[in-house]
Amino acid sequence: RHEMNMKLQRAHGNVDMVEHHDGSTKGSEKITHLDKWINTFISLMYMLYPTLCTATFSLVGCTSVGEFNEYIQGDMEFQCWRTTEHVVFVVLLFVPAFLVFVVGLPVASLVMLRRNQHLLHINRRVKFQLSILCVGYRPSLEYWESVVSLRKGLVVGISIFVLQAGPKLQTLAAQVLIGLLLVLQTSYQPYVKVATRH
């Protein structure tokens, strides 16, 4: 009877990724120290993501000083694009950090979830390892945390790159972005329904 209820809940998209399992801890299903380390590492990277985006974008975000001079927000000793030091910053720091952190972390989480999609509902260890990425989302939309990460990165990008345009344009750009993402979230409805209206 329990299995039939779970199948019905999955069909309607109302099952939580971690909370609903059979509770078995036999053999390969037992949570190990490695599983806990993986879960902790993923949680740590998830929490650090906005800070990593800020540090990465500040390497190319420029601040005007006076009428003609622009300096790097991350280090006001270097002029933007006029010195070899800034070009070195961009090539050796910004490009790798952008690819590894800003783009790499959401893509890596998406790849992990896609690769283990068939195990998320049946393997307790996989559910535990990836729980920070997929808990609370409907079974067909476990990847939605990547969309949330992308939203965070875009908001940080707006806060840094639109800084020169002034607070009005910065606020407008952020509101437009959040409005578009709200429409996207309303269309897909990624979260597990836990009550009739919630």
Image (tube, rainbow, N blue to C red):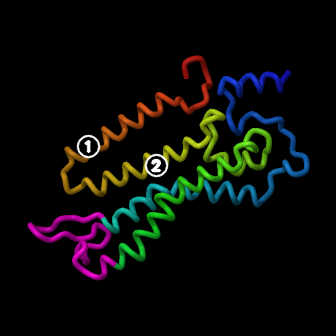
| Start-end of magenta stretch | 61-87
Q: Residues within 10 Å of mark 1 (few under 14, many from 20)?
A: some
Is tag 1's residue or tag 2's residue first in the polypeptide sequence? 2
Q: Label 1, on which residue?
A: 171
User: Can you say whether 49 is above or below 137 in the image?
Assistant: below
Residue carrying label 2: 150
Left or right: residue 185 versus residue 54 is right
Q: From this view, report whether residue 32 is shown above or below residue 12.
A: below
Q: Amino acid at mark 2?
A: Leu
Q: Which residue appears at 55% of the width and 33% of the height?
A: 190
Q: Quadrant of the N terminus?
A: top right
Residue 180: x %, y % from top left: 37, 36
**From the viewer's perspective, is 5 left or right of 84?**
right
Q: Which element is circle 2 on?
A: helix
- Work out whether residue 16 or residue 60 is closer to the camera in this orientation and state it: 60
Residue 162, horizontal then vertical, whole percent: 25, 53
Residue under the point 78% across and 22% down: 5
Let me know if residue 71 is in the magenta part. Answer: yes
Q: Position of residue 158 (x, y in %)?
A: 31, 51
Q: Nearer the viewer, residue 155 or 43?
A: 155
Q: Name the quarter where the C terminus is drawn.
A: top right
Please name the residue shown 41% across and 31% down the image. 183
Q: Secondary structure at mark 1?
A: helix
Q: How many marks can you see?
A: 2
Q: Is residue 150 left or right of residue 122?
A: left
Q: Quadrant of residue 79?
A: bottom left
Q: Is residue 27 magenta?
A: no
Residue at screen point 56% across, 58% down? 45
> x%, y% of residue 177?
35, 41
Neighbour tally class for label 2: few under 14, some 14-19, many 20 plus, Cα within 10 Å: some
